Image (spheres, helix red, strand yellow):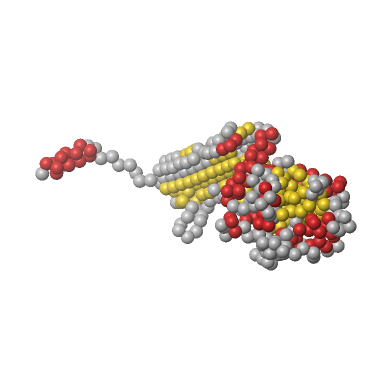
Amino acid sequence: MSVAAIVLAAGKGTRMKSAIPKILHPICGLPMVEHVVNNLRAAGIQQIIVVVGPDGLDIDLGSDVKYVTQEEQLGTGHAVMQAEKVMEGYTGQVLVITGDAPLYRWETLRALVDYHLEGGALATVLTVDVHDPTGYGRIIRDVHGDLERVVEQRDATPTEALVKEINSGTFVFASAPLFEALRCIRPQNVQHEYYLPDVLTILKEMSNGKVQIFKHRDPEEALGINNRVQLAEAEQILRDRVREAWMRAGVTMMDPATIYIDATAQLAPDVVLMPFTFIEGNTTIASGSVIGPFTRLQDVTVGENVTVSQATVIDSILESQCDVGPYSYIRPGCHVGSGAKVGGFCEIKNTTIGCNSKVPHLSYIGDTHMGSNVNIGAGTITCNFDGTTKHHTTIQDKAFVGSNCNLVAPVEVGAGAYIAAGSTITGDVPSGALAVARGRQRNIPDWATRWGKKRLIEEES
């Protein structure tokens, strides 16, 4: 039987105290609503409808997601009503979940759907016992232990408020009875809103309709996110799960609590992550690579047996067996070839470094194409910006650039050419040539002695 999902994502989340809608706040590198959608897909749900506010969503959740707008925020029941038109003719089951519920594992959602289908119910509500139920709707059971009703926090009596079993905000419904019952609910509550849980009692009265409870044992998954404190708690939970999953997949982590891995990253077995390392975005790391300590990789492709230590690399490619750091910054658009080295205190930007080439230390290389087996001396700078326009530098295979050189772009250094230390190169260097671009050294004999005597006379006078 087919199962669709409605994700409630129209709330403003005023308690977040943010200009960013609550469901767009990131957790492990993804907006929380994207975690929800991904978990629904993993649970086998193929038709997903997201209910958004009048401003829509500033992200793309995928071509398989449909959007409907809730112009006024009149409650969860009203939000689900907005999906009726796009679901016209659909006769399957509907899972309803909030967009701020990223902690549900896909296995839990799948188990909820299966339980609903096996029970043949018109509705199934996912509940959980929590230590502090403040803010949640309470599950009120009848004398037989079945669901009687759901009472929201603000409408609960003192006795009802003591109940620890809460409504998680996640349900599965038979679609036709759901929309029929929604037309019957009324905003007769403190909030003057259309509460989705009110349909449960209506469904029970429909030809003795069956409404059942799926009680989950893990309150962590039902954690609501309404403020920055709860956002941080959810972040910690998801990061723990991500770390555990990669360690079980063969990744070594020295001090896991200090390692941060986004949900979108991909790691191979035998990767080693050292303390205080951040793996962000769509980073992929191949087997045998050692990353960290104190390293940040964002949207980076890392080959096998790469070493990156105390460095930042963004939107770049590091091929196998290259070595980066310490204290280097590889900016977007770089491609570091196999066996190449970017050493300490270097900055590389929009540059290709060929195989086995070396930029060992204290250099800036920008807008450059560097061939293989090139050696760049300490303190070398490619002067790529003239104040208005960026210019390109080409350094061909096996060239040798001495220390403290300036290559004023646009300029090309030929294959096997040498540049003497301290040179400022403003023109092309032919292959195999030696370029020397510095003032000739002049030594003045006894200058220090004479200067010292003159200074002593001046001081005495």
Which residue is depicted at the point 69% across and 46% down? 164
* Residue at position x 48%, y 38% in the image: 344
- Which quadrant holds the C terminus? top left
The residue depicted at 70 percent of the width and 51 percent of the height is: 160
Quadrant of the rendered structure where residue 284 is? Answer: top right
Q: Is residue 101 left or right of residue 180?
A: left
Q: Which of 320 and 132 is in front in this view?
A: 132
Q: Nearer the viewer, residue 104 or 218?
A: 218
* Residue 14 visible to an observer of this rendering: yes
Q: How many labels sit on residues? A: 0
Q: Residue furthest right?
A: 207
- 206 vs 388, left or right, is right
Name the residue at the bottom extreme. Answer: 71
Q: Residue furthest left?
A: 461
Rendering quarter of residue 84: bottom right
Residue 70: x and y in percent read: 70, 64
Residue 20 visible: no
For the point 80% across and 64% down, which residue is it?
184
Whole-percent x and y of residue 411?
A: 50, 51
Percent across and percent down for residue 363 are: 47, 43
Q: Where is residue 318 in the image (x, y as percent from the top left)?
A: 60, 41
